[in-house]
Image: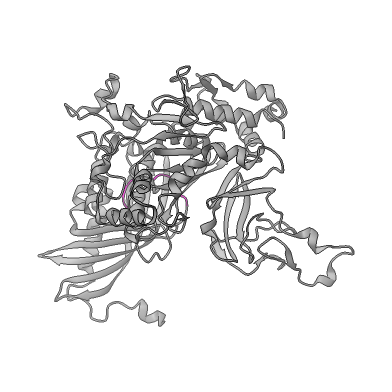
Amino acid sequence: MVAAMLNGHSDTIATLVEPGRVHRRVYADPDVFELEMERIFGRAWLFVGHTSQVPQPGDYFTTELGRQPVVMTRHRDGAVHVLFNRCTHRGAKVANERCGHAARLTCLYHGWSFDTDGTLAAVPMPEGCAEGFRREAFGLARVPRVAEYRGFVFASLAASGASFEDHIGPIKSNIDDLVDRAPDGALAFDLGVHRYAYDGNWKLQVENVLDSYHVPFGHASTVNKEGVQFARREGDKAGTQVIDKATDQVADKAAETDKSRTSQSWKGRRSYIVGNGHGWTSNTSLDDGKRSSPAFDEYKRVLIDKVGAERAQHILTPRLHNTLIYPNVSIMGLNIHVRVIKPVAFDRTEINVYPVRLVGAPDAMNFGNIRLLNVTHSAASFVQTDDIEAFVRTQKGLRSLAGEWVDISRGLGVEEPDRELNATRASAMHEMAMRAQYKAWLGYMREAA
Amino acid sequence: MDGAAAIRPAARPSALGRAAFEDFLFAEARLLDDRRFRDWMALFTEDGTYWVPAVAGQDSPLNQVSLFYDDRDLMKTRVDRLEHPRIHVQTPPSRTAHVVGNVMVDAADDAAGEYVVSSSVIMVEYRDDHQRMFAGRQVHRLRRSGDAFRIVQKRVDLINCDSAFDAMAVPI
């Protein structure tokens, strides 16, 4: 009944988002989730994977777009395709390994086999095919729109809608920021994947990516008595000053009295939005003069060799902490990785975290990053697990009908233009980025397909 | 490859007997179940590592991600956090029960005091109204130090190492 009420009634959806707040049903209503699968994941440009996951012809990588299984393939002409991973005969999922290599994708059930561009190559016992059966009509369906930028493959399940350029254009330079760090100007997603999941809505992770306000509290257990987080980049001796040095040992009291001791440098972080729900947070100042280790120094030398000292200096200056490319992917600029958000149900989400290999960088540099990423974003990490706990508790709390609204009003009305960056900026302690996400959310959701 | 050879116990068994190793593994598991993480860490040598791969049959902890890959420095950061009053993912704390069995001394060098011991491990974890199970094969590289063993490396290969896990906090 509620679904019927929501479906096709854009006005009802519009009532779920107000300036500075969103309704609890946005997270807690399975019917809203169904509509998201149709109207957001059914048509937005979604991150699929990276071309380096299918380096050779015949390589494939399976994933989901929304809930739909797809397979990204490399065809023998070098082209990358994104195909629906569903046999055109009786519907079985054709490719079942997370990644693999096959000259043809063959369905286990009746042996139909498909070329890596989706073409139906062979049907066993073709003499049994019905009169007028046309093999050409039975290729694996292609995802309607696929586009790539510097190895990042995106797809839209809708044949029409905003162009890739319109969608990704404003946030492209954030992809550049990461890719340019590779001496050879390319990334490779070949260092494995951290997979974690939680009993909570997918948007809780999306919001969290650009939420710097939570860090001194949510991640209190990651800072030492000096208020400093552990080192998260190769070559750093220590991490960020998150809270000011404790004058006593009573950390809990500090939070209760709102004398949070959040450090000035942390409070100085900014967040930026550029439309379409995209945005980023600036990096906290880390003392780059001191960043040094054998691996980092060698990497820096290689980078300078390739691009020159001035350009290398620019590349190595941290500008971005987290970038969100709405709705399903984020890039972390500190301990570099790409994070893919996969909605499973209104109260269940899977996250895939890919460390990126900087092609051309010394192995020790790339391996150092893997080691740090284990610590921050594995399912057993020091950082992400407390976020997950926050997501789980939020999903539980939102079962309550006592409060209908979730407040995201911090800094409402004090956002300011940043003409140099062609963006809108605010303190990262504010909730501008979430409001921007819900503006994009509503843009998708209120419009019938 | 000769499969039978691969699972045969060490050609030259340790004079210590299997029970000595079992006692050590049981005691180690007990420390984890009792949440005596700092004492557990002290079992490791200064160059010791704790590794839980995220890839089945993972060759190296260096070139692929792992669920855990802690040297003593990281282990200390982990234990500090486990003891921190505001570790939200351990509020309430996990309760665990380890079962260690099928212990085999795979390699023994009594003269050098170096051993490789493999065993099956099951850890049942209960926290916040949820109970779940981890299972796999673990390999301890042990070094004899006086009357005691120290862990040079503990590797736990979970049967579901490459699945999507809900948040984990305590070592297996």
Quarter of the image for residue A168 reads top right
Which residue is outermost to the top? Answer: A413
Q: Residue at x 38, y 31 (%)?
A: A212
The residue furthest right is A131
Q: From the image, which quarter does the C terminus of chain A lie in?
A: top right
- Is residue B165 visible in the rendered structure shown here? no
Taking B161 as reference, is A256 above or below it? above
Position of B134 relative to A210 (above/below): below
- Figure disc tally: 0
On-image quarter of the N terminus of chain A: top right
Percent x, y of residue A64: 59, 49
In the picture provided, is B45 more to the left or to the right than A274? Answer: left
Would residue A173 be seen by someone viewing this image from the given angle? Answer: yes
A436 displayed left or right of A296: right
Indicate yes or no whether the magenta region holds residue A13. no
Q: Position of residue A252 (x, y in %)?
A: 26, 27
On the rendered structure, is A314 left or right of A167?
Answer: left
Residue A163, given in percent of the width and then of the height, sits at: 65, 40
Residue at the (42%, 45%) spot, across then down: B131
The residue located at (52%, 38%) in the rendering is A171
Q: Would you say the magenta stretch is mainly helix, strand or loop?
A: loop
Identify the residue at horizontal 55%, vertical 28% (top origin).
Answer: A438
Viewer-side residue, B35 vs B171? B171
Above or below, A323 relative to A68: above
Front residue of A396/A163: it is: A163
**Residue A30 % position (x, y):** 61, 34
Find out whether residue B167 is within the magenta segment.
Answer: yes
Which residue is outermost to the left? B146
**Magenta highlight range:** B164-172
Q: Name the colouring of the figure.
A: one colour
Residue B3 vertical placement versus B121 (above, below): below
